[in-house]
Image (cartoon, rainbow, N blue to C red):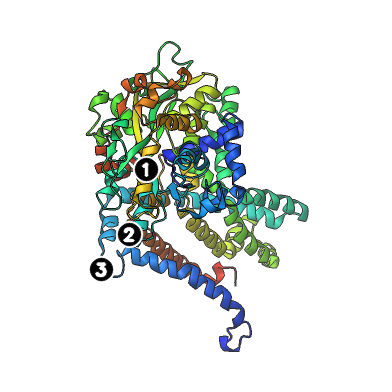
Amino acid sequence: MAKRPLSGEPYVGFLLPATLLVCGLFLIPIGQLVALSFGGLEAPTLRWYEQVAATDSIHRILLTTFRIVGLTTVIAVVLGYAVAYAMAHMGERQRLALLLCVLVPFWLSVLVRALAWLILLRNNGIVNEALLGSGLIAAPLPLVRNELGVVIGMVHYLVPYAVFPIFATMRGLDGRLMMAARSVGASPFRTFTDVYLPLTLPALFGAGLLVFVFGLGFFVTPAILGGGRVVMLSEYVSISVLQTLRWGLAAALSVVLLVATLALIAIVSRVTGVRRMLGAS
Amino acid sequence: MTRSTFNDDLVEIAADELRAGRLARRDFLKVLGAAGLLPAVGAGLGTLPFGSSPAAAKAAELVLCNFGGDAVAGMGEAWGKPFTADTGIPVRVDGGSPLAGKIKAMVESGSVSWDVCDGDGFLCNQLGKQGLLEEVDYGVVDKSLVRDGWAWPHGIANYTYSFVLAYRKDMFPDKPPTYADFFDTAKYPGKRTMWKYQMGAMEACLLGDGVKRDALYPADLDRAIAKARSLGDDVIYWESGASSQQMFLDGEVVMGNIWNTRASILERDTKGAVTWTWNDGVFCPSSFVIPKGNPAGSEAAQKFMASMLDPARQIKLLQLLGNGPSNPAASAMLPPELRRIDPGYADNVAVQAIRSEEWYEMNYDAAVERWIDGISG
C-alpha cells in the first residue's frame, strides 16, 4: 500500500472522536498513574521504584508471572496454529463448525470458564473420578489448584486470541506458492517448512505477542485455579491498592509492566516487521 | 476478583438466606416494599431510606455505611428503624464499603458523606491516630456494655465474628479435631482450607505448631508461614466466604479455618455432615467509627452508636445476619438455639482465642503482604 499524505485524506475527521476518546479516557489516566508512581508531581521520588528493585518477593512474583505467561503463550500459539491450519484448509461446513467451537467458549465469561475447569479437574472432579473409576490411577492427579491448573485455564482462555490472527493470514496466502513448491519436487513437509511456515511466521509472532500481553493482566483465573498459592502481578497490584494502601507501589509496578510490554512489542516488531505482523504484507 | 472482607460476606449470606426463604421475611418485605426504589438504587448503590414520610426524609438524616447488599436492609432493620423510632432521625444505610482508604480520602478532601462506618476493630486506632475520626463520647455511649478493651477512643465494637475450625463429621465422629490434627495430613488425609489473607490462618498455623491460644500475640509470622507451607499441596486458600462454603459442599476439603457464619450455614445445609468447633477459634470484634466532620454532626452519630448496643437490637442482628452481639448481656439473654451460633456466648468465648486488636493495628498491613508472599510460589 502506498503512503499518502494525511492532509489529502477526507477521512481524518472520522478519526477525531476515537482519538479524543483515547486521549481523554486512556492517556490522561495513564499519565496520572505515572505521576502517582513517582509519588505525585510536587515532590517526585523514586522510592517506589527502589522498592520494586529491592524487594525479593516482588521479583519472585514478577518471575512467576513471566514464567506462567511465557509457558501459556507457547502452548496457546502452538495449539492455535494447529486449529487455524485446520480451519483454513478444511471444507466450508467443517470450518463453520470449528469456528463455532472456538467462538462459543470465547463468549463465555472468564469466571464461568475458570469454575468449569474446577469442576472438571479438581481432586473429586469429573476427570479424576473417571480415571480413578477405570483403575488407571490410584490417587487423584493434582490437575488444578496449582500452577498447572492456572496454565490450563489461561491457555483455554487465550487460544482463540491466537487462532484468529493466524487464521486470517493463512486464508490470505496465495495457494499457488505451495503448488509451485510441490511442482518443483518439494515434499509436503518441505513445502510446509520452507514456504508455508515462513509466510505465516509473522502472524505467529503477532499472535504470541497478543496472547502474552493479555496473559500478563490475568487475575481471576490464577486466583481461582491456583488455589491461592499462585500469586501473579495483577493480584499483587490489587492488594497494594485495596488492602495495604500503597498506591505508589502499585503504580510503579503497573508502569514497570507497561514499559516491559512496550519494549517487548518493539523488539518483536523489529524482528518481524510490525506491518507484516499485523497482517499487511 | 476483589477480596471480600468479613463484612461483605454477611451481606452475601443474608441474600442467600432471604432467597432460600429462611430469614424472617415479613420484616424484610416491609422494608423492600417501603422503598420502591430498591431495585433501581438499592441494587446498585445499596442505599435504602428509612424515613417514613417525605417530610422526614428532608430532615437531617444519619448515614450508616457498611459493606453493601442485604446487610443494608439487615442493619437498617435491626439498628436503623428502632433508632428512627426513638429520635425521629431517619437512618439511611449506604453500602459503599467504607474501606480505610476511602475514609481517609473522604476526610482529607473535606467532603464527608458518612456518619457512621463499619469496619474491623483495629481500624479504630489505626485511623483514629491519623486524626481521621471523631472521638467517641463515652458520656453518651456506655462503654461498660461491651467487653473490656473493645471501646476505643475512636470507635466501639458493634458485633462479633470468629474464625473457627470446620470439619467433616464422618472423619471425627467422637470428638472435634484440634489444629494438631488439622496439620496431620498423614493421619487425616484430605485437603484443608484457610483464608488467603492471613487473618485466622496465621493463628491456626501457630496453634497447630503448639502455641497456646493465650500466647498467640505478639505473633511469630515466620513460624506461621513455615507451618502453612508444610501443608504443601494439601491446602487450598479461600478468597470469599462463599468459596469456603462451596469447597466443603463439593467435598474438596475435609477441614477448614472459616468464618463462623459460614460454618453454621454449612452445618444446617449438610444436616450436620459438616460441623464446627469453637475450640481454638479466633474471636474478633467489628466496630463502628465516625469519620471526622461527619454531616449529621457528632451528637446524632454518638446517639446512634449508643443505641445499637441495646441487647434486643444486638440479638436482632444475630438473627438477621448471623453475627454475634458485642454486648455480652445480649449473649447472655439468647434462647438456646441461638447460643450455639453466637461466637460471643460465654461458653463459646471461653474456649477461643481473642484477636489482639493492638497487634493487628500495628502489624496487619505488613503481615498480609508477607503472608501472601510466604504462601505463594
Residue that carries the numbered disc 3 in the rendered image: A43
- Other-residue count near label 3 (Cα within 10 Å), few / some / many at <14 / 14–19 / ≥20: few
Give the position of the N terminus of chain A as an image quadrant: bottom right
Q: Which one is nearer the viewer's eye here, B62 or B344?
A: B62
Residue B284 in the image, given as x and y percentages of width and height = 34, 33
Residue under the image location 68 percent in, 68 percent down: A174
Quarter of the image with the C terminus of chain A is bottom right
Left or right: where B291 falls relative to A72 = left
N-terminal of the pair, mark 1 or mark 2, is 2
| Circle 1: residue type | Lys
The verdict on a common chain for dots 3 and 1 is: no
Real-space Cα separation, disc 3 to disc 2, in angstroms: 19 Å
Q: Position of residue A162 (x, y in %)?
A: 57, 56
| Residue B211: numbered disc | none
Marks 1,2: beta carbons within 8 A? no
Inspect the image, locate mark 2, and give the three-letter code of the amino acid beneath it: Glu
Badges 3 and 1: C-beta atoms under 8 Å apart?
no
The answer for which chain carries disc 2 is: B
Eye-nearest disc, 3 or 2: 2
Provide the secondary structure element on which disc 2 rests. Answer: helix
Question: Which residue was labeled with disc 2?
Answer: B108
Pair 3/1: label in front:
1
The residue sitting at 59% across, 82% down in the picture is A12
Q: Is residue B261 left or right of residue B138?
A: right
Please name the residue that numbered disc 1 is placed on: B303
Q: Amino acid at mark 3?
A: Ala
Residue A140 location (% of width, % of height): 51, 27
